[in-house]
Amino acid sequence: MQFTSEQRLDDGVLEREFTLGEIPGTLWTPGSAAPAPLILMAHNNGLPKSASRLVARARYSAASGYAVACIDAAGCGDRPRSAADEQARADLHRAFQADEPVDEVFESIIGPLVENAVPEWRTTLDALLSLPAIGGPVGYSGWTAVGIRLAVAEPRITAAGFFAGGYVPRAQREEARQVTIPLLFLLQWDDEGNPRQRALDLFDAFGSKEKTLHANLGGHTGTPWFEVEDGNRFFGRHLK
Amino acid sequence: MQFTSEQRLDDGVLEREFTLGEIPGTLWTPGSAAPAPLILMAHNNGLPKSASRLVARARYSAASGYAVACIDAAGCGDRPRSAADEQARADLHRAFQADEPVDEVFESIIGPLVENAVPEWRTTLDALLSLPAIGGPVGYSGWTAVGIRLAVAEPRITAAGFFAGGYVPRAQREEARQVTIPLLFLLQWDDEGNPRQRALDLFDAFGSKEKTLHANLGGHTGTPWFEVEDGNRFFGRHLK
């Protein structure tokens, strides 16, 4: 893990860019010296780690005492796109424009993206836990599909907050029953591109004994800021 | 309003029983001297104000800086039951025992209970707001059916937390669209006696622009304690 830049924010949080092999990432750590619990954070569908909403959430969590890390998935954010990546995005765009069913196109894009992202997240987790600034335990926040796969594959993940507004491939919908860690599942009630019933069915399917659904009125990007605070309190119950 | 008994709790909260005409009530006020915002609190279906779960919630909210008041509905708790009340309860018991549909029995019991309770709550509110210990604004917590009726009829109610696990008469389901104050709606995902879809439909129907659903795994009485804390934070956003 190579740190390539750093800046100290006003509230003492240290924000560092890093690379780990081909993987670019950002790490936020709190100003205090004690080893912090860790939250792995990712946007649904491979949105970039530099997106302002993700950065705002990460900084807030770091200021609250968590180390937070995000990486870009292959073909996303700062990483080069292959011809196949470009073609897949063009297919998705065309399907949306033509108002065609997008499930199969999503399946062909997001399915492999999740499969490829999870080993990279595990490699990143190994590297992060070797840093003196990071203690544990480890939580996960954001991208539902990757979170399901990670929660099933990775015993170091002890609690997770998922945002319902993203495509969840069939493989992850099927393995949702195997997720048994405490969950907070966040749903926008009128999310334009993500059917509400599918999200409610997924919440129902999770195998966790402790699982909580928070649903708010409004569209995909309308999540109220108090949910970020609620997410922090959820992690406070499980990671501190 | 006549206070008939009082006790000072360890955390400074003053717990007082009162009567207002035929209405028996309990008022909890915080230890601090400043006039407090007020939460009207009631169990679904007319369960008594002395029930331990309600008392625990009321004491916690009072210790957090709210005045909290609860009254018994006519025929419930400390109030005398008429022959008709006894007959209605016997009908409900028989319907449950025989595994018969209980909606019509509930409708005949809870419908009038709500209609009669709301004027009493408004009279109580008048009396409470004349006390120096109580300032405002006013929130409502608990019994959904009474809360819907009150939120529509009573402009002094500015925010409400409803517990989904109780019978909501058709009249209140129909006027749910007229509820426009900020809402927190609390659902137990596997509530034995209260159909989940009916609760989700009710959440969908509320006319409020700010409404949040919290759903937790488990049966009717399994609401986790952290929801009481979340409820306090919801009121903190709207009553303080």
Image (tube, coloured by chain):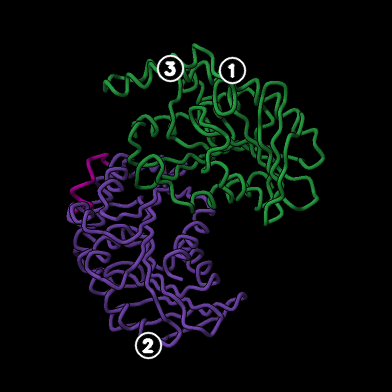
Chain colours: A purple, B green
* Residue B188 to residue A73: above or below: above
Q: What is the crowding at mark 3: few (fewer than 14 residues within 10 Å), some, or many (at least 20)?
A: some
- What chain letter is assigned to the residue under label 2? A
Which chain does the residue under circle 3 lie in? B
Q: Answer whether residue A74 is magenta in the image.
A: no
Q: Residues within 10 Å of mark 2 (few under 14, many from 20)?
A: few
Q: Is residue B12 left or right of residue A229?
A: right
Q: Secondary structure at mark 2?
A: strand
Give the alpha-carbon distance from disc 2 to disc 1, as whole Å: 70 Å
Q: Residue furthest top?
A: B84
Amino acid beneath label 3:
Glu
Q: Are labels 3 and 1 assigned to the same chain?
A: yes
x%, y% of residue A145?
A: 27, 58
Dot 1 corresponds to which residue?
A: B116
Q: Decide whether residue A102 is among the magenta residues.
A: yes
B171 or B143, which lies in front? Answer: B143
The residue where tag 3 is placed is B107
Mark 1 residue element: helix
Query: Which residue is painted at 39% across and 51% down in the image?
Result: A212
Q: Which residues are magenta?
A: A98-107
Q: Nearer the viewer, residue B76 or B210?
A: B76
